[in-house]
Image (cartoon, helix red, strand yellow):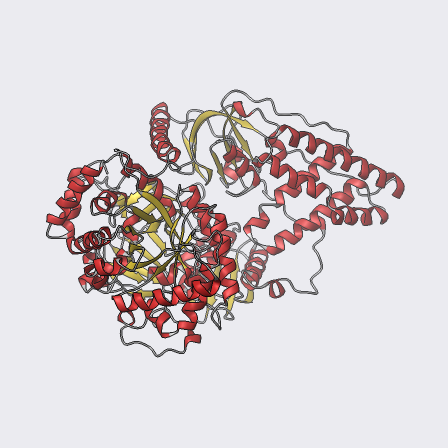
Amino acid sequence: MAVQHKVARGAVVPVGETVVGAPLAGWATAIEAVPDPVFSGRVLGDGLAIDPYETVLKAPCAGVVLSIHRARHALTLRADSGAELLMHIGLDTVTLKGEGFKVLAADEQRVAAGYPLIAFDLDVISARVRSLMTPVILTNGDAFEIVSRVSEGSVAAGAEIFRVRSLKKASAHAVAPTSSAVGEEAREQAVVAAPNGLHARPAGLIAQRAREFSSDITLQVADRKVSARSAVGLMTLGLDQGVEVTVVARGADAQAAAKTLAQMIATLEADAKASVPAEAPAPAPKARAPVATPAAPQSPFLEGTEVRLSGVTAVPGAAFGRAARVDRRAYHPAEAGAGESVEHARLAEALAAAQSAVRSRQAQAKAGSAAHEILAAHLSFLEDPELRSAAEDQIRAGKSAGWAWHGAVEGQIAILNQAGAARFLERVNDLVDIDGRVQGALLGENEAAADLPDDAVLVAADLLPSQFVGLDMGRVAAIVTEGSGPTSHVAILAAAHGIPAIVAVGPEAARIPSGAEMLIDADKGTAVVFPRAALVSETLAATAARRKRFAKVQAAAHEPGRLADGKRIEVVANIGGLADVALALAGGAEGCGLLRSEFLFLNRDAPPDEESQFREYQAIATALEGRPLIVRTLDAGADKELPYLGMAKDENPQLGVRGIRIGLARPDLLRTQLRAILRVQPVGQCKIMLPMVADIEELGAARKICDEEKAKLGISAKVELGIMVEVPSAAVMARELAAIADFFSVGTNDLTQYVLAMDRMNPALARFLDALHPAVLRLIGMAAEGARAHGRWVGVCGALASVPLAAPVLVGLGVTELSGTPKSLPQVKATLRRVTEAQCREAAEEALRQETAVGVRAALAARWPEA
């Protein structure tokens, strides 16, 4: 049964703690699971993310709106306690430049918990961005910390997702107050290069970099200035591409700070030509700073004093053990060589020895495993002709083999550093690794695995893959590193072995003494040195219970969807393109119940031709490996602008020319799309679904066009043609429509909007717009009854299908297919496995007897209090 997180009525919140509620209903997930390194790497701060079921972002607590991003996709709220919370709707949504969003609040407005802040159109946005995951981030982590948070699962709007409390004293990682900065002043001018301005990602990276300097650094535009250490502050400037800013630094390292940040502003997210000046020489090898710069020596933490360190979760889990430090061997090759022929021979011999060592390790790794693939990458570096050629050039210039190879590797690292993307920067360690392998081979060293104690917590500056693969994994309890990232190769290797890992802890990790007892709670990104016994017991027990519940649900994710009495219920996924297929299958999807084809039609000057559409549909069908694929024909029109259609603006887009109406108004578009879908092999895997059908005439006209195109293609096999039930008239006339349609799929988002006559983008109505309203449920029941009269099946592909608690009610109404978000599928299946068909009918009947949506939810909560 899915877990619906909620705050217990009458629960006492400790003084100094702030309860942060879910700003919208959806599927809560750990922040490290967000597919964006700026969020998953906690660059902007700690928190979690919600994959939304609904379309209005609400205040998670009482406070003041600090800033609303000019692209309307993100908002920062300062709670009454002073905690600052960033809510970012979807990933890469800044590129939409406000389209699909409606701001409902204003800067500096005071709001109560639950106040509507931003409304958004799920269909417009989902078709154009890679994820709707909405991070909720605590941005002032130097003054507040998250003390508890919910585990993965379904959350209702307003339900507690985490708590924060004020730090009574400055954190070990807190930035020194800017007012105390003294010393020289440096100023640099820079022009914002990022096409979408200083939105969350570049702002977070700039702030992260600024914290590495001791100087006070501000960004100034006209009479406005903010601290460069504050990502939120940078976002509030609202700087667009091309705006000139002044970087002002004051302190001991002011010159370096100002130049570094100005360069970042001038290059971050710029295109390749703009970000790398053609005349810029490649940096000299010795100019690169180490990947993890060691801090000045500090005294080790004292035994008996509990110390809590924070980092980035690379692999979730918890463990208790003793610290085992893993140090990296430093090499200092001589510059001068002993002669060209001698050094060429030494390099060739060392490369051969290093390749042999990697192949030996690779042979011990399971084919297809993460270790096997990473070692294959290392082997390709060692065999890289450009690296070898660059080293040989330096040998011809009189350098030693060691110096020459190091220089060649450093040159490649400089290119990666210049590229700036996190995925490239995390490959730097792989190059450092192969440099060390060759240097060791030049000195005649043999690889030796570290001698580890049982339950070892590996502590390192940056653990290299070569240091990891030779370890006795049975002795490794956890990993803690000063640097590295959550997608580094060491993180991937640790995940493959199920070893909890925390990265980017910072220089404080250097103070952890060997042999110190350590408690790792990677779910929360914390490492506790010398922990209290009670904390160890509590953390390990809670983590084990959480993992057990989650593992049980995940283990059964790929089982067919069915009820406790064996009745089959198909559980499939809504997807927006080929990239979503892998995530859907990982969640146990039995196919695709809704492919939003709009992604092919948006952001272009002309409609896609038949061939390009066919290639996309075929690729998705192939990736689904024979599982059913339902393609919704173009659901666009005046509400999702396609300039090439040349259509007049509708007074009310929701009631205008959209869905099937646009297809019938432009039959050339509809015929082209139908032909592309019909051509997908094997014939019949692809089903066709028509959106916004209101009456029999629309369906009949579309069916006629489809049959004509089938005949032209010479297709005699059955290809199912169904409709979306999202207009009330379709539910009322379901019996008549089912005589022509092969199936129904209920779009609960639009159906709820039309049944209740409430614009889903209207903030004043947001709290009333509930798909569990009895009127909506009755229409779903009518649609199912009409379908049964002709032996047709009925699915639900709206947001309600992703709510585990709603699944039994929908089944009780006659639904036999549920199509939800990939993340929700395991819990939906788990819920269904615990109920019988009779119980589903009872739940549906009870829901239909209620007078309000609140009553329905209360009845379901009473029926399944643990849900």
Give the residue displayed 52% in from the left and 32% down from the top. Answer: 299
Number of disc labels: 0
Residue 521, quarter of picture: top left
Q: Is residue 41 visible?
A: no
Expressed as whole percent of the image width and height from the top left, the position of residue 463 reads 58, 35
Q: Is residue 645 left or right of residue 656?
A: right
Where is the N terminus found, in terms of image quarters? top left
Residue 345, quarter of picture: top right
Q: Nearer the viewer, residue 660 or 775?
A: 660
Where is the C terminus found, in terms of image quarters? top left
Residue lying at the far top in this picture: please name it.
Answer: 454
Expressed as whole percent of the image width and height from the top left, the position of residue 735 reads 21, 57
Expressed as whole percent of the image width and height from the top left, the position of residue 318 reads 42, 30
Q: Nearer the viewer, residue 671 or 112?
A: 671
Q: Is residue 106 left or right of residue 215?
A: left
Expressed as whole percent of the image width and height from the top left, the position of residue 404 reads 78, 45
Give the residue displayed 66% in from the left and 53% down from the top. Answer: 415
Q: Is residue 765 visible?
A: yes
Above or below — where is 320 with respect to 66?
Answer: above
